[in-house]
Each structure stands twice: as C-alpha cells, then as structure tokens.
Amino acid sequence: MNIAESAAVEHLFISRGWKKAEFAECADVVIINTCSVRGSAEDRIFGRLGYFTGVKNIRYKKPEAKTKVESMKKAVEFTEKNGIVPFTVILMGCMAERLLGEVKEKWPVLDYVVGTFGKYKFGDIITAVEERREPFEIEEEETYSFAPVSYEEEAFSTFVPIMHGCNNFCTYCIVPHVRGREVSRPLDQILSEVDFLSGRGVKEITLLGQNVNAYRCKDKDENGNEIELNFPKLLKRISGHLDSTNSSIKWIRFESSNPNDFSDELIETVAADKHVCHGFHIAAQHGSTEILKRMNRKNTREEFVELMAKLRKAIPDVQVITDLMVGFPGETEEQFNEILTLMEEVKFESAFMYFYNPREGTPAASFPNQIPVELKKQRLQKVIDLQLKHTQEVMTKRVGATLTVLADIVSKNDDTELLGKTEQNERVAFKADKKLIGSFVRVHLDSLNGNTFKGTLVD
C-alpha cells in the first residue's frame, strides 16, 4: 500500500512538471512515506529525520551545519554550486498519522506532516512550494480519498487500491488506529484507473486493501436496481471489463486477504476466472485457536485448514503465502508448537515471519505475560528454518512444469537472461531477447536455484 501511495504522489508531482531528483540531498522536495506496523519501521524513520535535519542545515547554510561529514558531501556540493535553494521536507503515511500532533514539534526539519486523511492536500502543497509560500497546516478530511492513479512510469505491473482501512481490530495491530475504518472505492473509479493503466501497456494489476476481500460497494444491476457489489462480484466486473475493452492487462492479483472473508463464492470466482492469478497471500498469524481468539482473529485453526483444503481442491495449482507471528503475550511452548504443526499440515510456499512487537495504543501491548525478546527470537528461528525447508519442498515439486510467465526485467546476474514471474508470483530466470520484456511467454521450469526457478523459453 505504501508503494502504491508513494507512486500516486510521485505521479501527481510529475503531472505538474516536476522531475525526480538524482539525489535526495539535491532535491527541492523530499517526501518520507512511513509505516507504523512495527516499532522498528518507525525507528528507521527517526533516523531519516535526523539525517535530513543535517541536510537541511547545510542547504540553508546554518551555523550548526556539519559540512565535513562524508554522508553530507552531496548536500555540500549542491549548496556550494547553487547557493541557498528552498528545501521542503514532508512526512506522510501511518507514522505521520499516529504522531500527527507532536512529530513536527519534535522535528522542526519537517515543513508538512500529511496523515492518512490529509493526502488530498498534496496539490495545494505543491502549489505552495512552487510559489515559495510559507508552509500551512493540513486539515484532515473525515473520510479517506483515493488517489486517481497509483502508476509507476513504464511499469508492467502496478497496484490499484480498492479499499482502505480495517474494521477487525486485531489486538496486536495498529492499522485500524492509523488507517481508520474500511472504505471501499467506487467501481467507476477503479475501472477508470484500469483504463488508464491499459492505455500505458500495463500487463498485470494487484488490487490492494488492508482487508481487500472485505470490499463492499453500492452498484446497480442491468435493470437499474441498487445492489451490493462484494469482492467476488467486483472481480467479475473488472475481468469482464478487461475483456470488453481488449485491455493489455491479462492478470489480476489481490492482497492482503483475511481468511474470514475468503468465502466459498470467492473461491468459485477465482477458480473460474481466467484473469485471476493462482497465488494468494492469506494471513494465518498463528496455529493455536486460543491465541487466535486472544488476537481477536475471527477464525479458528480448523477453519483456516479447511479453507486451505477448499482452495487446493478448487485450484490444484494454487500456492499460498502467509503471515506467521511468534511470541504473542502468554504464548506457551505448546501453543508455539501449534504454529509448527500448522506449517507441517498446510505447507505454505512462503511466509512473512516475525515476532510480536508491542505497538502503543493496541490492547495486546498491555496484556500480561509478555514473552522475553530472546525467547521470541529463538522461536522465530525455528519457524524460519521450517519454512525454508517447506519452500524448497513445495517449489521443487514444480520443477518440470511449463508455465505462462510475465517477463518483466533483465537479470542482474546475467544480462542475457530475463526474469519473469508466474501466476503464483514465483521468480523465473531464462535466456531470452530483451525485446520480450513486458510479454507473456511460456517457460519450462528446469531447476531451482534458491527461491528462483531456472527455465527454458518454450515459445
């Protein structure tokens, strides 16, 4: 989502005649997009704010400027050549929303703090910068506004946000507190962006939402009667639109999915739709029903396993990646082992694995029996080791298949090879002419090197 929102802001600047700076230290405007999911993400941002404080001191030739520091060399060279040029620093995103009332006071380097519900003001910010006016305070809207486009120039794959926020309030999660309640994007806006992307030769889109398959929006049927458009019906509408407009977009992905909203209707839809890719990100989070209950997840372990079975029956070539958290407050050794047994039972192709990180303002941060960090690290390593084993097992079984692959970049290791991705979002390296970049090709999977397939172009 942050990549999509960064791309939307970048697109707005470019549409106004701005260009990307080669170096941040030489830019007119620096925008720091932030995340609050984990404390470590915010810690990195504080480090960036400290760094840009140093850059700004140099750019404005302040007495405290540290011109001898090696990392400030670009800023020093720019200022010596151009003199004092206005340097605007903007903080946006979830951390900006969480610390909205205090971060600017603590970090005077910031000219603007743009929270989740203030991004609609970026046009006015650009105008103020262009006219060299003093920064103004951002007033947030009551409801979230979707950017018209989240396109990265010359990209063959791009994100399309379709909903924002979350109503689930998992006890460990900061997202509902900084992103707000669920808001679904109207269908006409989604199709308008799809048409824009089609006009630029995009080949695949990923529909985005913090809880993407909870999408709900009002629509009208062919008789003009008002109906509710849920996520499966949205997929059908987008897919039909791609066909009727002869779109360049052939693949649709979506993330992140909540298992509680992965309905039988959705399974039937993705199994039957030729445009929907067969790789899904579905967060399990834990293997213990008791822990899931304390996390305020809406499903049990058994229901998650049943969902995986339904998916694999309906879509034999499906691959699932997941999220796994260890060290939730009060997690016993027995409950931790239920993560490992879930992994053995389901065999995920890949996983995002992490230990519980308390977030201020969430209920779990004050739960008793917090797990010591060292124990969390030990448990996490066991999960990582097991998942690496499973990834090799699952991917090795796919060697020998011939699959459709979207060729998207030249390999960094060998400029005679292209890298592409399968429907399951796996990486494949194969010898091919660069002119095939942006094309769908058939590739035979010959072997596995780490987590990347080695293949041979078939046609």
Image (spheres, rainbow, N blue to C red):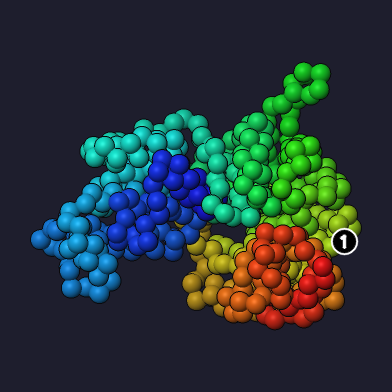
Left or right of 133 on screen, residue 97: right
**Residue at the image position 85 percent from the left and 76 percent from the top:** 400
- Compared with 98, 40 (above or below) is below
**Residue at the image position 44 percent from the left and 46 percent from the top:** 14
Q: Position of residue 103 (x, y in %)?
A: 31, 49
- Compared with 200, 121 (above or below) is above
Q: Position of residue 192 (x, y in %)?
A: 63, 35
Q: Residue furthest right?
A: 313
Q: Is residue 34 at least partly visible in the picture?
A: yes
Left or right of 212 on screen, residue 146: left
Question: 79 and 309: which one is in front?
Answer: 79
- Compared with 40, 198 (above or below) is above
Which picture quadrant has residue 459? bottom right
Q: Residue furthest top?
A: 224
Q: Position of residue 63 (x, y in %)?
A: 10, 61
Q: Is residue 54 at least partly visible in the picture?
A: no
Question: 399 and 249: which one is in front?
Answer: 249
Question: 413 and 379: which one is in front?
Answer: 413
Q: Residue furthest left?
A: 63
